[in-house]
Amino acid sequence: MATLHRRSAPTGEHAALVTGNGEMGPQARPMPTGYCEAPEKLDQLLSTLEEARGSRLLIVIKGHPDPDSIASAIAQRALARAFDISSTIIYFDEISHPENRALVKSLDADLRQFREDMNLSDFDWMSFVDTQTPHLNVRIAKPPPILTFVDHHAVVGGFEARFVDIREDAGATSSIYAEYLEHSGIGLRPGNVEDVRLATALMHGIRTDTDQMLLAWPIDFRAAAYLRQFLDVDLLRMVSRQSIGARTMEVIQRALNNKVIRGTFLMAGVGFVREEDRDGIGQAADFLLRHEGVETALAFGIVNGDVVDGSLRTNSHTIDPDAWLKALFGADAAGRHYGGGRRNKGGFRIPLGLFARCRDRDVLWTITKKTIEDLVFDKIGVDSQDED
Ligand SMILES: [Mn+2]
């Protein structure tokens, strides 16, 4: 009679790994997942960091910090630290999403928001993580040269950096950083509180950017396999709890009320939205994409009274959000595109300029809504006058 042997008990194992206070159970030992997608990139990165040994590094998060950019920045700091490089992580736009504020707080991540009295020229180098372009949002006399640029978005324009790693077949920048950590020998240490937090942040970044692994690529699964052994599952559960704030709920409600569906395309103008609630537009697009028969959802509004802000989500095989939004909205005089994105999602921001001074908000919204709807419906080839 055959006997079934289990390698380990299916229950209780989770508890044996890492508990909330970072203590390790008896089975914890880093487990190699065995495959490095880009060993040559890793070698280049390590020699680039070696060249910068002992220097001062400014790690830049552009746009509103999100889980992927936050985790990637912390990982970049950890890698740099192994070369005695001291790093400061800086961001410019508010951390608008309550979950992301909770994340930064529970990671004790020491991110600094840019202030006028900071002298960015004091740094020897800059690193950009999870950002499509390597430009600072502020003008400074002498921007430090770029040491590293790591991203998973399609690149925009040319630039110079010592090390560039752009992988469009990665669901998250966090996955690329997990690969560096796993195969560099710098790696994460089981039970080390800071490393456990970093692993948890990277996992959260990957899950967020891949729609909870639904849109994950091989590198994302490999990263998750590596990170799994270091995770603080309680912390991960806490930071990924999906509560929706009252004001976001209101934006979603307006999107539902105003939705217009043409074929498989859904558009929803949400009117005026406060700067701190702008993430509600993206969440509205996420939600509306679940509408039966809809393949692409676009939600937009006027944020802060002066910029048209929109989010596109798609399951369509024929719409590439990055190319689609760039072609639709074009670029400003300096050649910067109003929109961009990656495989399944994208966004755009169009300043209203002089029109932001229009005193009649209803008129301003009507013009904005009409313009965006006409442009989009022209592009997808339907008449916006058609009724549902
Ligand atoms: Mn990302």
Image (tube, grey):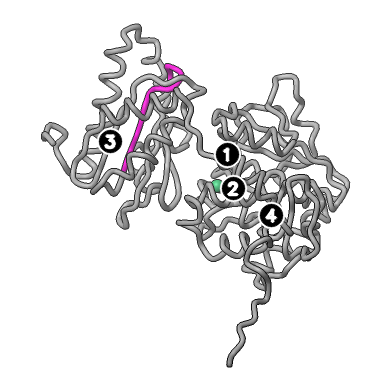
Where residue 251 appears, as percent x and y from the top left, is 38, 26
Where residue 284 appears, as percent x and y from the top left, is 38, 34
Quarter of the image where one finds residue 50: bottom right
Residue segment shown in magenta: 297-306
Give the number of the disc on residue 108.
Answer: none
Answer whether residue 299 is magenta in the image: yes
The answer to whether the residue labelled 2 contacts the one labelled 1, judged by CB atoms less than 8 Å apart, is yes
- Residue at 37% from the left image edge and 30% from the top image edge: 252
Q: Earlier in the sequence, mark 1 or mark 4?
A: 1
Left/right placement of residue 188 relative to residue 69 reads right
How far separated are the C-alphas under marks 4 and 3? 40 Å
Q: Which residue is mark 1?
A: 66
Answer whether residue 13 is magenta in the image: no
Q: Which residue is mark 3?
A: 267
Give the number of the disc on residue 205.
Answer: 2
How far separated are the C-alphas under marks 2 and 3? 28 Å
Q: Earlier in the sequence, mark 2 or mark 1?
A: 1
Q: Which residue is mark 4?
A: 163
Confirm if mark 1 falls within 8 A of ligand 1. yes
Mark 3: which amino acid? Met
Mark 1: which amino acid? Asp
Residue nearest the viewer, comparing 310 with 205: 205
Mark 4: which amino acid? Phe
The answer to whether the residue labelled 1 contacts the one labelled 4, judged by CB atoms less than 8 Å apart, is no
